[in-house]
């Protein structure tokens, strides 16, 4: 079977073999419901509790602060909508480069009486501090700023932003889905700075899809999105996905232990990649800001991103387009738009996100394939123009 080199780790990651091994018993003989009182159920409950401890330890949190969900989107919605449900409508502010699973629920709240403010970012994708201070002066009730952007990899100084907001009394949420496993991440330190909730997800760190967590300061009241049997401290009812949660625990443990070494190695690969891209005349987005060590977001002048991604896939390399282009939604990336990038350039955006399996040889091969693909596309364009 044709298997392209995988360079899209910000989308999802391969399942770590150790994670799969830990999950298998809970997909076979250990099938109990954690809410059952017999031994099958008690064993499942112990497994969920152990995973909760593992995730908490990896994040510098207490196990009672970890609320398991089905994914990062659910966790983000749980905080944004759940916190809003416990407050009178007021000002809700999110950065202009948040993931849609933060922006969309915020926009829903704006239709229900909340005032929504999208905080401006600079040309590198960092929160504009003057606009941030203006937002704080308006006495917000809810704030959400991501630690690392999923497209550009640009980092926000969440601790500093939360510290500035602390005296305002707003609840502060941070989407850390992309940061977990790639950067040091301590909920205890962020909580001390003024962050009240943190979202993380298993499938970004070598774990399974279907498991994530909202790490929540217990002083914050939120209403559940899903009512029922009162699972997860009454915040997320529904029978727990035991195999996925067990895998999440192992993945979190492994990610925390290997984070520093992985960041150093992958950061070196990214340096090689970006040197090669610069030689091809690529524009790198967010290059002047601190970024995740694995993420490169670029555009080649006069080359469409979706077309380039398709050609590279057929050449044996799986990467992502930064443009949300389809017949239903022709708009370019909202992240690049917020950064002031023109729609024409934004539609050429391509993201490469490296992972633990990425190698020097793959980076070199990718650059060679990219150069050949770009030359071919430019020739096609030239012939089309000449024919016209």
Image: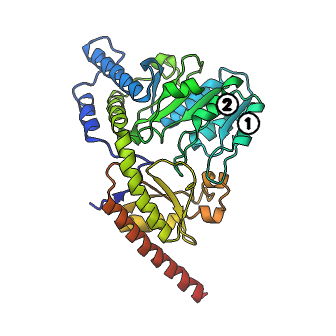
Q: Distance between the Cα atoms at labels 2 and 1?
A: 8 Å
Camera-nearest residue between 260 and 243: 260
Name the residue rendered at 73%, 42% in the picture: 130
**In the rendered view, how is the structure colored?**
rainbow
Q: Which residue is mark 2?
A: 164
For the residues bearing labels 2 and 1, Cβ distance under 8 angstroms: yes
Residue that protrudes farthest toward the bottom in the picture? 387
Residue that protrudes farthest toward the top in the picture? 37
Within-10-Å neighbours for mark 2: few <14, some 14–19, many 20+: some
The quarter holding residue 29 reads: top left
Residue 283 x/y as whole percent: 56, 64
Is residue 225 shown to the viewer in this render? no
Q: Which mark is residue 133?
A: 1
Is residue 126 shown to the viewer in this render? yes
Camera-nearest residue between 253 and 244: 253
Assign the N terminus to one quadrant of the image.
bottom left
Does residue 288 sit above or below 157 in this rendering? below
Name the residue rendered at 43%, 73% in the picture: 371
Name the residue rendered at 30%, 59% in the picture: 3
């Amino acid at each position: 079977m044709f298997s392209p080199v995988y360079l899209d780790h910000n989308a999802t990651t391969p399942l770590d073999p150790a994670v799969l091994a830990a999950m298998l018993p809970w997909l076979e003989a250990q099938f109990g419901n954690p809410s059952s009182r017999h031994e099958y159920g008690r064993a499942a409950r112990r497994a969920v509790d152990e995973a909760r401890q593992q995730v908490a330890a990896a994040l510098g949190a207490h196990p009672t602060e970890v609320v398991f969900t089905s994914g990062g989107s659910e966790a983000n919605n749980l905080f944004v909508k759940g916190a809003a449900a416990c407050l009178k409508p007021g000002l809700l502010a999110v950065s202009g480069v948040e993931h849609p699973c933060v922006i969309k629920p915020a926009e829903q709240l704006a239709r229900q009486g909340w005032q929504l403010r999208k905080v401006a970012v600079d040309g590198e994708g960092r929160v504009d501090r003057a606009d941030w201070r203006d937002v704080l002066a308006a006495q917000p009730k809810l704030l959400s700023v991501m630690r690392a952007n999923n497209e550009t990899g640009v980092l926000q100084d969440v601790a500093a932003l939360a510290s500035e907001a602390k005296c305002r009394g707003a609840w502060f949420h941070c989407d850390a889905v992309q940061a977990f496993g790639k950067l040091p991440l301590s909920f205890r330190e962020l909580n001390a700075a003024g962050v009240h909730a943190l979202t993380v997800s298993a499938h970004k760190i070598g774990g399974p899809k279907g498991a994530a967590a909202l790490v929540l300061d217990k002083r914050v009241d939120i209403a559940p999105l899903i009512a029922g049997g009162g699972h997860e401290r009454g915040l997320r009812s529904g029978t727990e996905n035991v195999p996925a949660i067990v895998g999440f625990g192992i993945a979190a443990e492994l990610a925390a232990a290997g984070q520093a070494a992985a960041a150093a190695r992958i950061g070196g690969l990214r340096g090689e990649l970006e040197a090669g891209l610069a030689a091809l005349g690529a524009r790198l987005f967010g290059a002047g800001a601190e970024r995740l060590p694995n993420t490169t977001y670029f555009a080649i002048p006069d080359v469409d991103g979706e077309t380039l991604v398709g050609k590279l896939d057929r050449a044996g390399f799986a990467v992502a387009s930064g443009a949300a282009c389809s017949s239903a939604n022709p708009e370019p990336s909202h992240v690049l738009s917020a950064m002031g990038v023109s729609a024409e350039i934004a539609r050429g955006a391509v993201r490469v996100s490296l992972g633990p399996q990425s190698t020097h040889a793959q980076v070199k091969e990718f650059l060679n394939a990219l150069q050949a693909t770009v030359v071919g596309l430019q020739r096609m364009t030239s012939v089309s123009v000449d024919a016209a």
